[in-house]
Amino acid sequence: MTNQTTCLIVGGGPAGVFLGFLLARAGVEVIVVEKHADFLRDFRGDTIHPSTMQIMHELGLLDEFMPLIDFHTGTLKVNINGVSFDGPDFSHLDTKCPFVGFVPQWDLLNFLATKAKAFPTFDLRMSTRAVDVVRDDQQNGNGHSGSGRVVGVICEHEGETYEIRADLVVACDGRGSTLRNAMTSLGNASSDDHRVDDVGIPIDALWFRLDRPQGDDGHTQGWLREGHMLVTIPRRSHYQIAMVIRKGGFDDIRKAGIEKFRDTVAKVCPPLSHVCGSIDSWDDVKLLSVQINFMRTWQKHGVLFIGDAAHAMSPVGGVGINLAVQDAVAAANLLAKPLLEKSLTDSDLAKVQARRGPPTRKMQRLQRLAHRALFSSGQRIDRPFSPPWYVRFAVRLLAPILRPRAAKWIGLGFVQEHVETPSAGNSQI
């Protein structure tokens, strides 16, 4: 089976589905392929920032989106050794929703996919895995060598392999991008452009869930005590929790036993002491390997990379989903017209990285600064959090200045995108 479309998007995460929605809304023919059968995967980012809700507002979707939010807050709080401190304050931001919301990622994706399916030019194919790229020198059949430009993707669905040809392929398939691996294995010098530069990260995260205790208000998301750190993300009936650990430290934590792990959770976050007994075994705890990386060139040979496929982010600040959405909005703004006019060039694709690369690097530098401040290299592997005295002093001294700036950097990003693509008016709703 061979298929043809204008834009083929690989990966049904926030970047892929949002870009597919925006392009279809503008009248561009789009196919989105997603390797899983549904969006129901836990321990993914849930933090929706004011920048993303502003985009929903500009699209006229905010009123329908708001009921999906499990919890929202204008100020993030942190508890250090039993003392509560106010973190970034979003309430002063000049935006439609000056707060942070927590939405299960599968609800966000199902919402966007449902809206996108209302456009006749949108095609979402679940359980469809991209396994390799198709290049123009593979289709000549006359012995002549082509330019190596990507003209499609080889996909697998229910044991069947087929090609989808497209004017543009957009890789939104995450930090372990199959298409990026395919491009770097082409065996030519230019494939180095598709490699990523990794930044050494001193932390990993252990994800698990616990019931929310009765009477808990959910406004404190950070808990720090005796060298341990927990991040509690509130949902309607439970917490999605991350324990920050020194990279490579999970084996030692497991050796100490599940009972010690439960005791640590209860000690760091006392409100969870009555519910942490529900962690039955290590099967309830998932390891997330934290990465920060940046792809050297986001486009080449007809493929564009955005979201985690182009730049993996640390969980610090919960910016991952929101930067992916900003990438998608920028890509749609820059590419919808040339795609519709069949005039797309590599220079058009390069404009996406020129637009989104600098603010992404700024955010990564901010995350790296936070890592260095909080997780110095001399600490024991089982005690990841112990900021130096001068960091604690600086934070206290500069809090009135840092809180509003941090809220703007986290909540809106260093470059805020707005919807510029027109609606083709072809929705079937």
Image (cartoon, helix red, strand yellow):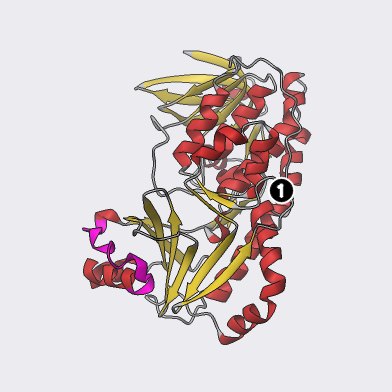
| 156 magenta-colored | no
Residue 95: image location, x then y, percent: 71, 48
What's the residue at 52%, 78% (across, down)?
376
Q: Which residue is mark 1?
A: 95
| 281 magenta-colored | yes
Residue 391: image location, x then y, percent: 60, 81
For residue 365, side relative to residue 261 (left or right): right
Dividing the picture into quadrants, the one containing residue 112 is top right
- Give the magenta range: 267-282
Residue situated in front as seen by the camera: 153 or 410: 410
What's the residue at 68%, 19% (across, down)?
27
Q: Is residue 148 visible?
A: no
Q: Is residue 280 visible?
A: yes
Residue situated in front as seen by the camera: 399 or 18: 399
What's the residue at 69%, 77% (across, down)?
398
Dividing the picture into quadrants, the one containing residue 289 is bottom left
Task: Give the answer, above or below, for where 390 lies relative to 119.
Answer: below
Residue furthest out toward the front? 215
Residue 74: image location, x then y, percent: 60, 57
